[in-house]
Image: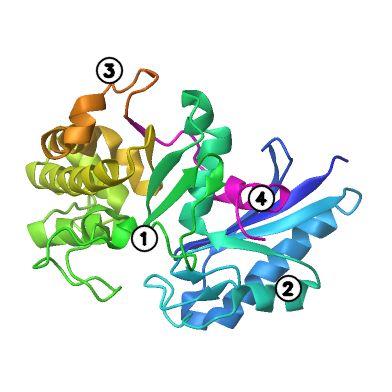
Amino acid sequence: MAGFSIGVDLGGTNLRVAAVTPRGERLDHISQPTRLHAGPYAVLDDMVAAIHTILDRRRNAELSGIGVGSPGPLELPAGILHHPPNLPGFDGLRLREELESRLGGCVSIDSDANLAAYGECLLGAGRAFGAESLCMLTLGTGVGSGMVLEGRIWHGMQGAAGESGHGPLDPNGPPCPCGARGCLEMYASATAIVRRAGQLGVGSAEGNGAAVPLTASCVAQLANSGDARALQVFDEMGRALGLSLSNLINALDLPLYVVGGGAAAAWPLFAPRMFATVREMSYVYRLSMPDDPAVYQPGRTHITPAQLSDAGLLGAALLPLHAHDGARA
């Protein structure tokens, strides 16, 4: 059996663990709900148990390393969580230390958004567009952001670079778990989609008339069927993303900006307003926008949906293999 590494994607909703080849081919995969209600040490136990299960299944192959992606803010390289908005009760958790103690070996740690950006750069949109530098927004339970500059993850002074999901867009907007108001996360995450849909009275019912709990995908289905209030949710989401991307483009002037995560599946619903807002608000984009956003042009600023459905998981698995290039091991 060929050598492999293990990637772990710790999310606020799901915990995923996979065995991956150096070329990014997934060999094995375990997914389960993240038991936030049981506390951080129960989640750590689940993570370690899944890793051991995969190791037992592949005992005849050589393990190259273990990489873990976690929601931030995350102090690197120590791997300490600091008030993560989507992991209540995890403040101060020494994730790297706890995992290395349980597993008896080295573990590479980085933020989930950084690793999603890294995975897209190596295996997804970055490879397709020939870009070694990109910024990625991940629209999931919250909104993460990661940057890869010339093939290396950009961490900033203390590992906190790329918190664009908590960049305030409206100081009078809804309060965010991070302590600010009107952050991008409050408009463009799956949680925000459901909340805003509820505020606007978006809903559906089963044939017997019983109410069906709203989900982001349910809101998207309603929007696709022409529901005006559901369409408004994604129009507002597109505007928020456009404002955030305008700031990023003006500040960074990178060739590629990628939008991924589960909520990005609604791209056709929010992208028109997003592009219109970027064209209006970013002079840098107007100077460098491609003739067709879907067609790669060298020297132009491209905004594109992610090409990988599991970029964060793949990025985590590749992290220990490229630690000298991509991130702090």
Label 4 to label 3, Cα distance in Å?
A: 34 Å
Label 2 to label 4, Cα distance in Å?
A: 16 Å
Question: Quick one: which residue is furthest to the right in this view?
Answer: 60
Q: Which residues are drawn in magenta? A: 302-329
Where does label 1 land, which residue?
A: 163
* SS label for mark 2: helix
Label 3 to label 2, Cα distance in Å?
A: 48 Å
Disc 2 or 1, which lies upstream in sequence? 2
Disc 2 or 4, which lies upstream in sequence? 2
Disc 3 or 2, which lies upstream in sequence? 2
Where does label 4 land, which residue?
A: 317
Which x, y percent locates residue 246?
A: 21, 43
Q: In front here: 322 or 57?
A: 322
Disc 4 or 1, which lies upstream in sequence? 1
Q: Which label was assigned to residue 100?
A: 2
Residue 225 appears in the rendering: no
Say whether residue 310 is magenta.
Answer: yes
Say whether residue 88 is magenta.
Answer: no
